Amino acid sequence: RLEGWDGCSGYHYSDSIIYGFSHTHLSGTGVSDYGDLLLMPSQGEIYFDNGYKSNSTKSYRSAFRKETERATPGFYQVTLDKHDIDVELVAGKRVGFHKYNFSKAGEAHVMLDLAHRDEVLNDTLIFLEDGKVEGKRISKAWATEQHFYFSMQFSKPYKRLELDSTSKKAAFVFEVEEDENIGVKVGISAVSIEGARNNLEIELSDFAKLKTNAEEAWTKALSKIEIESDDKDKKTIFYSALYHTMIAPNLFSDADGKYRGMDLQVHESEHEVYTVFSLWDTFRATHPLYTIIEQDKTKDFLNTFMKQYDDGGILPIWELSANYTGCMIGYHGVSVLADAHAKGIQGIDWNKALTAMKHSANQTHLGLEAYRTKGFMEVQDEPESVSKVLEYAYDDWCIAQLAKNLSDTSTYQEFIQRAQYYKNMFN
């Protein structure tokens, strides 16, 4: 689904209809976004309607049965009932690989839907020789200007192309034998078409190798904590939860180090840059876990914070695809930074980090002006006034702790005093 709280990722276990397979997803959020570059295999007559609004059978959507689904980290398989097409998908770091098995001989087609989900602000489709397609999609949703670029390669040239430019959709038509597989390799980038093409070339591999790479990467990640129990259900719950902690943040920079900054311009980085920092959700437990089991990534996360401060002028609150959403409360990037310093994470300019933390604390939005000037927030100052004061006071305490550890006495005194403001909420 595309709508509703439980449709935010584009997939929910209760779903019975598939509209296609896209390349970017959020998980666990209360606001929807992503779902970029939808592909959908089909046979028979070509319909450009996805059937979502019309509920029409004359569409490219398909029902599916749960018993045909199979999923492991980095891999998904399902059978589309409409034309008995078996689909397998595998993910690389910056690439996706689709494999479609057509059980019936004859004409088959793959629909490309560039308008799927969000409002499209700007788009391009480029059709090259030998079954290669490239393009861009700049869209507006929760992230008000999300840049997405792609380079994709079919395993064999299509015999003809049908376009519906008004709906931003294209159908690539193939002649297939019975039980023939058609593969689609897709490289993605937030920087440029060239970046997507380069990512595809660097990470290009066969389907089995990509699947093995995904399995090995996830086995290594999930083996960082080992538990002992004879209760299989407890193990399943534990490792499912550990898996969920690793779905985000997402790798955002290209293989050549280029990335799109929070000024929406292209920059270069010597370390990997990440996105999807839902910090109100993650500062309490997830990021403290990372300081134990993902110390190298934590360093990259924190240096990403500093690049977001350099490029966008502020530490993230809820950053999404180089967009500052300002969602949820507090400025919990400061908590993540202070915790990492306390845990001994190296490779960060901590004095610069303290400057950025103070900058976040001295804004005027989201009730901060009232909080700073009065020492509390009245209900008419800002919605969620009590929660915001409690979280601001905690973040100010975090700033004070880092200042103390860096021997910045004046900053410590200022923020340890602000950290007491929660007491002003008691009558």
Image: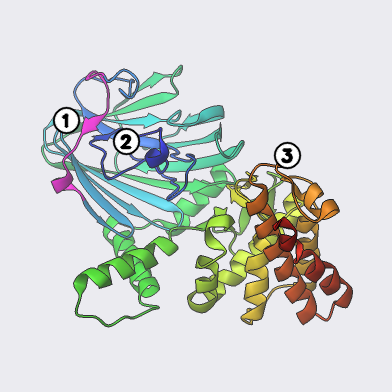
Q: Residue at coordinates 77% horizontally, 62% vertically from top-left? A: 356
Q: Is residue 293 above or below residue 116?
A: below
Snapshot quadrant of residue 65? top left
Residue under circle 3? 380
Q: Nearer the viewer, mark 2 or mark 3?
A: 3
Front-most of residues 421 and 357: 421
Q: Position of residue 223 (x, y in %)?
A: 35, 77
Residue range (magenta): 56-69
Q: Is residue 192 left or right of residue 376?
A: left
Colour scheme of the picture: rainbow
Q: Secondary structure at mark 2?
A: loop
The residue that mark 1 highlights is 82
Q: Is residue 304 above or below residue 320?
A: below
Q: Nearer the viewer, residue 104 or 79?
A: 79
Q: Is residue 47 above or below residue 367?
A: above
224 displayed left or right of 389:
left
* Among numbered discs 2 and 1, the one appearing first in the sequence: 2
Q: For label 3, count other residues whose C-alpha is less than 10 Å away and answer few (under 14), some (14-19) or many (20+).
A: few
Residue type, label 2: Gly
Which residue extends farthest front?
Answer: 427
Residue 270 visible in this rendered orientation of the protein: no
x and y, in percent, of residue 296 in the image:
55, 74
In primary-sequence order, the first of circles 2 and 3 is: 2
Task: Give the residue type that dot 1 points to.
Answer: Lys
From the viewer's perspective, is 340 left or right of 168? Answer: right
| Mark 1 residue crowding within 10 angstroms, few (<14) / some (14–19) / many (20+) | some
The residue under label 2 is 20
* Disc 1 from disc 3: Cα separation: 56 Å
Residue 148, x across and y down, in percent? 53, 41
